[in-house]
Image (cartoon, coloured by chain):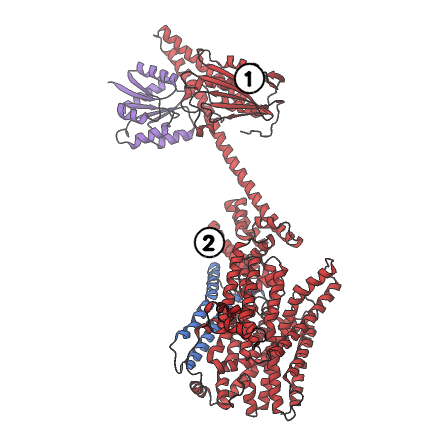
Amino acid sequence: MSFNILIAVCLAYVVVLFLVAFVAEKRASEGRLGWLRSPLIYTLSLSIYCTAWTFYGAVGYATRSGLEFLTIYLGPTLVVVGWWLLLRKLVRIGRQFRITSIADLVSSRYGKSNTLGVVVTLLAVVGSTPYIALQLQSVSLSFSVFANEAPVGVHLADINTTALWVAAGLALFTVLFGTRNLDANERHHGVVTAIAVEAVVKLIALVAVGVFVVWGVAGGPADIMDRIQQSPNAAWDPNLGRWISLTFLSGAAFLCLPRMFQVLVVENADERHLATASWAFPLYLLLMSLFVLPIAVVGIGMMPTGANPDLFVLTIPLALDQNALALLAFLGGFSSATSMVIVAAIALSTMVSNHIVMPLWLQANGTGASMSGDVRKVVLIARRTSIAGVLALGYAYLRISGGGASLAAIGLISFAGVAQILPAMMGGIFWRGATRTGALLGLVVGFAIWAYTIFLPSFGGASLLPDHIMAQGPFGIGWLRPQGLFGTYGLDPVVHAVFWSIFLNSCAFFVGSVLTFPAPMERLQGAQFVNIFDHSKGAQGWTRSMAETEDLLVMAQRILGPKQAQALFRTVAQEQGKAGYLPDPEPVFLERLERELTGSVGAATAHAMVEQIVGGASVSVKDLMAVADETAQIMEYSSQLEAKSEEVARAARQLREANDKLTELSVQKDGFLSQISHELRTPMTSIRAFSEILRENDGMTDPERRRYSGIIHDETVRLTRLLDDLLDLSVLENGQIDLTLAHVSIDGMLDRALLSGKPHEASDTLRVTRVSSRPNVVVRTDADRLTQVFINLISNVYKYCDATRPELTLRISDIGDDIAIDFVDNGTGIRGRDQAVLFEKFSRLGDEKAAGGAGLGLAICREIMGRLGGTIAYLPGQGGAAFRVTLPVDATGTQNPPDLKHS
Amino acid sequence: MKEPSNTVFLERKSYRKRRMMDAARVLPLVGVVLVLIPLFWSRGDGGTSAALIYYFGVWLLLIVVAAVLSRRLGDVDAETGD
Amino acid sequence: MDKHVLLIEDEPNIIEAIRFILSRDGWRVECHSDGQSAMEAVRKKMPHVVILDVMLPNRSGYDILSDMRADGATKDLPVLMLTARGQTKDREMAERLGVSKFMTKPFSNAEVLKTMRELVDA
């Protein structure tokens, strides 16, 4: 067939792609997205995973290693089938935080660290370059196949020239459709639609070749199975290490390749598309792989020895003069290569411009530029230059490496390179403890080991790593041989590189994270990434909503009863147009539920219960406080959250406190009334009993009569005193007393108190010692009230001091600005647990009824001291009972002290 | 949109959904185990064609199960979405 | 008949009054003022009737009553509870614990005498 026809078809195909991209872009800009954002387009766009490596290289791979090529497709299949575990989270994070690339993801997660962004970008560029070179090489090779067939093959004899043209063409296409505008979410509808078309073309092409090979060349599936049995790979001898590490590697690369991240996360228009892709994409991979082994075995059988198995897809139809099929196969390969290069270039250019060029430009210009038109222009230029640069790098790699290595080997090197991002990424979205330092360490270590063990050796010859290092290790240290680290020579080079780079990368990441402390911003971002499903709500947050609603239903059923609760939820669900399902936890619904619950458990409780289920922000208030000094944007978000949760917590706390206090007061009041009743009834009992005795018993002796009337008299006095005390206390507590302030001497008041406090019947047995740090202390206070306190304390010593020879020490001292007067006796003192209730009303301790007090004395003292602006407290550890009265030197007293007592 | 079924209780429905989520989480692990199995088959002649059939069978199984799960897990949104 | 009463009460004046009233009526009156050891005293003295105060040092009258009702030897002893705590819930509490008679302070001497006779005759 004419080489010119090939060129013409090729150009026509490119024009069609341009048109598709253009139309899609136009529709998107007009807002008529429609099928542009269908799950099908999304799934097809994922097919850029299948590059020319798959299209051509898989057959070559199968020829060399049999079924092992499957690992490259089983890895992504497992990842996609497990979308619920991982991809869903990744996509949610990407959408929520408007992630523009994998470098942006890592950088954002670790506190928007640009260093990390730069490292990931470099890693991605270095890792992708061989891959881009591979695509250029495969396109050129396929051209050359036709050129060799063609009568005039002079123009394209040089593979490198072809590659250059292809690179230039692709750069043009990518610049045109990849950098048309700067969309906030970095979606490229034109490009995505074009690659979806290419995905269809490459699938049809490969399947067509496969069908032709199975039914046209061979005699159907049975014959193919026969041929497989007779092929060199018939024996089943899988290399366990390679199978496992390649499956892992392909799964990891599926997540980490910049272009995959671009279509998987950045270009994702709707999370639900993932659900479709979870089975449709594996199906696509299956179809792409189905005919690989048949083509390989047929190729081995019919092609001359020495034919490049990487090109069987193309050369088998050509050899059998199926020109149309060969052309289709060529277009398939062309599609595979171009779609990969285009998306890779877009992804890499985004990363390069966002993480390297822009920061440098902003720094150079000095000003903190906002996203004005000026900067947008710079960004666009940066993107376009980056695209050209990425393709130039690919071309350069092709020239330097000489394109000698087989396609599969180059692809694996690339995979292993980008897989180094995996630990930082996975750790970032599943582990809050991952830190920036850890991520950086892991990336650098992994990158270095990857470069040393597989990337540099891939250049072959002695170009970058001298032979003696390869053979004996650097400085002759055998341990460090690039393909035999720590003596593991026995491993396959790829397995060796993957194992050591990922293992040491993960170790460095983990150890680095554990040993370092994250900055506030990192902690905030970490919490938000890891708990992404707790944060995002609304249409996309249905899992979270459902979980909440289910919890709410469980709670409501307990309180309202299952029937009523279910009826309520069903009604609301129907009102929301979600018949038959749990309703969304919309504010209206929550308010209604709260009202329903209020009827049963009270407003505050209902609110608290609903709030507890719905409102739980995973970022704790403490986290947010720590971040308060960070950027304004974060602060705004956090302060809203913080204010909300704090407000609710405060309200609930206040309610609870008020409730406790009321309950306590009510209990106290009951107790108080019951105490008063008891205290009044006791003397009245004696009075009544003895009055009746006196009235009803005539034959009593005089002493008897005198004694009984004496008792009545004493009990009456006791009753009066009790009433006086109660009144006194009541007046004090209500703040209704008038203080008569004057300058008075403390010593004088103590003298008076010592005289008055002594009971009439007491013999003069109390020994009083007075110790004073300074004599004649004068304070301004109400002398009568203070003396009342002193009297009370001294009479308590008479009543309660149980020493055989009671002693009282009066100590006057300065404590700061206050005067302290201590009353210390030599009795047994007061037990610890009693000290706590000493000043409470009616808190008589033990059996000191004999003392005749109602237990109000110290309560009154406390009230008086409060009025006088001082305090009275029990002073433990003084040997006996000890009370300390403190008052300010200028005790002006207060009519309304701050701590008003309400009881 | 489906007619609301009056016989299905709400909590039963969401209970099923929860279990579907569990299944979706377990599926990749099952897949890993299934992929590993042939690696421990006895080595020798003719095993490759058996492995070929096995792998494509497992692959298809994963696809079918994933399809069923994605329908079950996706339909809540399908109600409100397009 | 030698009518024997144990008075468990801690207020000296009330003890004196009750002792006076009951002695005149032919009762042998013994006293105990501490809550903690009251139960021991009841078991040792085994009176015909026990008069019990509620607010006692160390142990409440309710506890003593409940102990008496749980002890085989004292569970049928008539108990007259005399207390200054006259609220309905106090009476209810006493009745739940199995008190024989419940009277509030201040009491009428005649009524105490009458009740005591009833208790010992029953």
Q: Give coordinates of residue A613: x percent, y percent.
A: 52, 52
- Classify mark 1: residues with Cα within 10 Å, few (<14), some (14-19) or many (20+): many
Q: In which quarter of the image is residue A362?
A: bottom right
Q: Which of marks 1 and 2 is nearer the N terminus?
A: 2
Q: Give coordinates of residue A661: x percent, y percent.
A: 52, 35
Q: Is residue A571 left or right of residue A11?
A: left
* Front position in the image: A546 or B66: B66
Q: Do labels 1 and 2 share a chain?
A: yes
* Front position in the image: A478 or A531: A478
Q: Write the residue at 52% across / 88% down.
A: A306
Image position of A873 with respect to A448: above or below: above
* Front position in the image: C114 or A645: A645
Indicate the colour of chain C. purple
Q: Mark 1 points at which residue?
A: A787
The furthest residue to the front: A475
Q: Is residue A533 left or right of residue A718?
A: right
Do we see residue A96 in this rendering? Answer: no
Image position of A721 with respect to A632: above or below: above
Indicate the colour of chain A. red
The numbered mark at residue A562 is 2
Indicate the colour of chain B. blue
Q: Is residue A67 left or right of residue A341?
A: left
Q: Write the residue at 64% across / 92% down.
A: A2
Mark 2 is on which residue type? Pro
Identify the chain of the residue marked 2, using the numbered disc in the image. A
Indicate which label's residue lies in the foreground, 1 or 2. Answer: 1
Q: Is mark 2 on a helix, strand or loop?
A: helix
Mark 1 is on which residue type? Thr
Locate the N terminus of chain A by quadrant: bottom right
The furthest residue to the bottom: A151
Q: Quadrant of residue A339?
A: bottom right
